[in-house]
Amino acid sequence: MRITYAPWGETLAELADAARRAEEAGAEVVWVPELHRSATLSAAAIAQATSTAQVGTAIALAFTRSPMVTALEALDLDEISEGRFILGLGTGVQRLNEDWHNARWGKPVGHLRETVRNVRHFWETCTTGERIDLDGEYEPMRIRGYERPFPVLRTDIPIYLAAMGPAMTRLAGRIADGWISHELCSPSYLEQRILPEIDAGLAAVEGRERSDIELVVSACCSVDPDASAAKRRVAGLVGFYASVRTYADFFEFHGLGEQQQGVIEAFRSGQGADYLAESVSDEMVDALTLNGDPDKVAEQIAAYEGKADAVKLSPPTHGIAAAETRIAQDRIIELISMITGGRQ
């Protein structure tokens, strides 16, 4: 099982330095998100700061860029990283797409399927001058008279899809090179809810096998010799997601439905979504995050063995000061070195 990391930084320079240190510690992939920064620009920054670790977006928003722009950015990032790039795509939610980006939403599974098709087809044909004529309900692509004059390092850049719901998870099983979990994904949820859908997606395509897709579980991590400090540092993240009603089934699965409702009520009372830690119990934190001293967290990571192919560790950021996130980040990087033995 590969150990990977999602670095954090207040500046791009700090982000790049954290990626470099994680690589030195033994992280095999460094991932960047998209919300407060552009995923593709962040990926460019950390690609130039690293030399051996793969560089991935986890995730770039699929519908706020055209498939052609996504394909071009991926080609450029693969060139910058010398063939180390992974294109991680996700849909985001409807409100974010329509209200924040004025982007089309439609039916996200079909929309994402067409997006991935277009990106791959563009990679295969962009240097030939061949006419592209793809039909689609959401992403038709018709290009004539275009020929990329620059070399393409790879036409098979890996595409990973972020998915939580059954239909999107099955899509990942059908068409993706990898699957990336939601930030909260326990071993039991992975085993009972995710893996059956991945298997169903794989089975729908003749000749496709489990080895054709890498499963990356995301895990927010808080390492501290003080157990209480470790839990409280990560409680804000749990509160942030618990404030969203659409995650009700997820919390119910873990027997935390009533506790989620308490967080929602605190949110409705006026507490900001990033500042709900006081409404989050230790039970919720323990069920949904990795927290504790280094040995305990290493054991929690090991619980994904045989279920996930890689674990993407990330430091907490919700409702805590930057100094606290730095502490968490430094301890995770130390933990990665402890687990892997550092870069060989």
Image: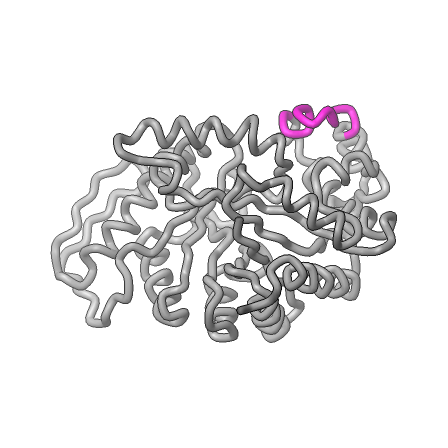
Q: Is residue 299 left or right of residue 178?
A: right
Residue 255 lies in the magenta-colored region: yes
Q: Position of residue 59 (x, y in %)?
A: 50, 51
- Asked if residue 223 lies in the magenta stretch, the reply is no
Residue 35 location (% of width, % of height) = 57, 54
Rendered residue at 14%/56% (across/down) = 144
Q: Residue at x 46, y 69 (%)?
A: 52
Residue 191 placement, left or right of 111: right
Q: Between residue 72 and residue 284, name the one nearer to us.
A: 284
Q: Is residue 231 left or right of residue 116?
A: right
Q: Write the residue at 34% across / 27% down.
A: 203
Q: Main secondary structure of the magenta part?
A: helix
8 or 83: nearer the viewer: 83
Q: Is residue 155 above or below residue 164?
A: below
Q: In which quarter of the view is residue 276 placed?
A: top right
Q: Which residues are magenta?
A: 249-259
Write the residue at 76% across / 27% down: 261
* Above or below, comparing residue 134 to residue 293 in the picture: above
Q: Residue 255 in the image: x percent, y percent?
A: 73, 24
Q: Nearer the viewer, residue 89 or 219?
A: 219
Q: How many marks?
A: 0
Query: Residue 24's quadrant in the figure?
Result: bottom right
